[in-house]
Amino acid sequence: MIPVDSPALDRSGITYTAIDLKRKRKRGESTAIQHPLSRWRTINQHRIYSSKLLDALRRVGRNDLPARSRGRAIRVAADRALAATARGGTQWSSAILSGRPIRLKNRRIRSAGGGRWKKPSGASKSCSKMPAVERKVKLLSRLVPGCRKLSLPSLLEEASDYISALEMQVRAMTTLAEVLSGAGGAPAPNRPELDSATLSPS
Amino acid sequence: MSGRRTRITEDEINELVSKLQSLLPEARRRAAGRASAAKLLKETCNYIKSLNREVDGLSDRLSGLIATMDSNSAEAEILRSFLRS
């Protein structure tokens, strides 16, 4: 728990206080305060995530699930591990941890505005009078978890962080898959963010 | 995005959205070029969707692999020790 009045130092060296976060949240602003490009590219972050991911995989592995739903269960577990690694401060991570309903493709999205939108989210042609930019912003807000009601600047900040996090998730899951499939037991050479110390025995 | 709040000007939108371009990987960035806000937003959405598809694919791949991992928990322990150090 971060004490209310003392600064907390995170690994990237940026200080912030719980009060700052609280104020930002009250104003409906995104509280993603670290630069997403560096935040999700550290070896440490990758390691933390991989560790949580592995725990989650073993939990899934213990259940007797048919192959099809196992893949789905792993996706959910991997997302929760990712959100946990984010350590708060973003809408998308809070939304995932509070158990957002699973997003299903090719389903009609119920409109919050009382029935104006009856088209599936994948429709690209629209006779709506909404300008193109606004339509795309709406689409983006549906892709990033928990961000449907954010202002544009906050939405873009959340999207930045979410994208960087997803990229790390891909790197980590790929590496794990390669290690588990016994592909030499070492990370692929074109991953500069991992040094050999990460995966070789100490 | 609510219309009830203060309207953001088109310039402000364009400025904010142009920052998205730096998030896109090189290939997509080139395709976007000097793109409009709408085009950049669309590319961003496409990129997120493709990342999600990639994660789904990896999840399926891992689901096959953990089946074998369970039968050899020594391997899993070695992995854990790598990640702990």
Image (cartoon, rainbow, N blue to C red):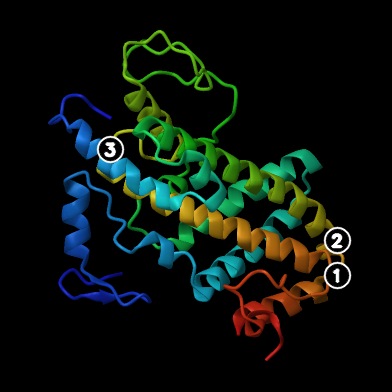
Q: Which residue is mark 3?
A: B14
- In this view, which residue lies farthest toward the bottom? A202
Q: Is residue B19 left or right of residue A23?
A: right
Callout 3 secondary element: helix
Q: Quadrant of the C terminus of chain A?
A: bottom right
**What crowding class fits label 2: few (fewer than 14 Cα within 10 Å), some (14-19), or many (20 or more)?**
some
Label 2 resides on the chain identified as B
User: Residue A201, which numbered label?
Assistant: none
Label 3 resides on the chain identified as B
Label 1 near label 2: C-beta < 8 Å?
Answer: yes
Q: Is residue A158 left or right of residue A16?
A: right
Q: Which residue is mark 1?
A: B72
Image coordinates of residue A153 in percent, x first then y, are 26, 43
Q: Quadrant of the N terminus of chain A?
A: bottom left
Of the two numbered discs 3 and 2 on the same chain, state the one appearing first in sequence: 3
Residue A21 position (above or below residue B12): below
Callout 1 secondary element: loop
Q: Of the residues shown, which amino acid type is indicated by label 3?
A: Asn
Is disc 2 on the same chain as disc 3? yes
Residue drawn at x 57%, y 73% is A193
Disc 1 from disc 3: Cα separation: 54 Å
Callout 2 secondary element: helix
Q: Which residue is mark 2?
A: B68
Disc 2 from disc 1: Cα separation: 7 Å
Residue drawn at x 41%, y 35% is B41
Image coordinates of residue A113 in percent, x first then y, are 31, 17
Q: Is residue A199 left or right of residue A102?
A: right
Q: How many marks?
A: 3
Residue drawn at x 73%, y 40% is A69
Nearer mark to the viewer, of 3 and 2: 3
Label 1 resides on the chain identified as B
